[in-house]
Amino acid sequence: MSIRCIVVTPERTELDRTVEQLTLPMYDGELGVQKGRAAMIGRLGYGILKYQGDSGPERLFIDGGFAQVENDVVSVLTARATKVESIDVDQAKASLTKALEMPGSTPALQKLRSDALNRARGVLRTARR
């Protein structure tokens, strides 16, 4: 075990543990992190943070945000972090339907609709795994 992973939401610290390796859901793909990774800051997408802990592989749905890697510490700032096992497929489908029904008549509304669609699709992909 050689990397410290800290996941923080506006409400609390969701995760603070030492792991062997992890995979971050970046905005443009996945990023694997192992001990000795070069420092970086990146934008997170909507997807699964996978990590290898003492009890085996574990997964959290990450609702966007930012990640920083420095000195074998990975800090994740996100709006929401949810255990993958607790995501309901029917609720995820309902969220996608609701996002599809959002208006997009102005640039601001189009941005809100796009963000809601990306989030809902990420949750649904995660729920189906």
Image: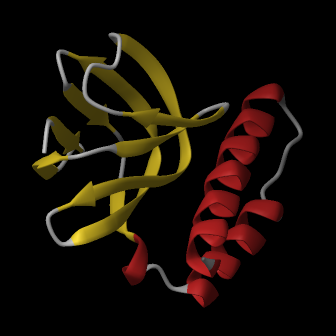
Left or right placement of residue 110 versus residue 48 in this view: right
Above or below residue 70? Residue 13 is below
Q: Residue furthest top?
A: 39
Residue 12 appears in view: no
Task: Give the percent coordinates (x, y) of residue 39.
Answer: 32, 10
- The quarter holding residue 109 reads top right
Q: Residue at x 62, y 89 (%)?
A: 90
Task: Give the percent coordinates (x, y) of residue 105.
Answer: 89, 39
Task: Give the percent coordinates (x, y) of residue 52.
Answer: 29, 57
In the image, 1 versus 51, the foreground residue is 1
Above or below residue 39? Residue 74 is below
Residue 77 appears in view: yes
Above or below residue 5? Residue 107 is above
Task: Give the percent coordinates (x, y) of residue 25.
Answer: 52, 42
Q: Residue furthest right?
A: 105
Q: Residue at x 38, y 82 (%)?
A: 86
User: Which quarter of the image is occupied by the N terminus?
Assistant: top left
Q: Residue at x 36, y 27 (%)?
A: 67
Q: Residue at x 57, y 77 (%)?
A: 127
Q: How is the image coloured?
A: secondary structure
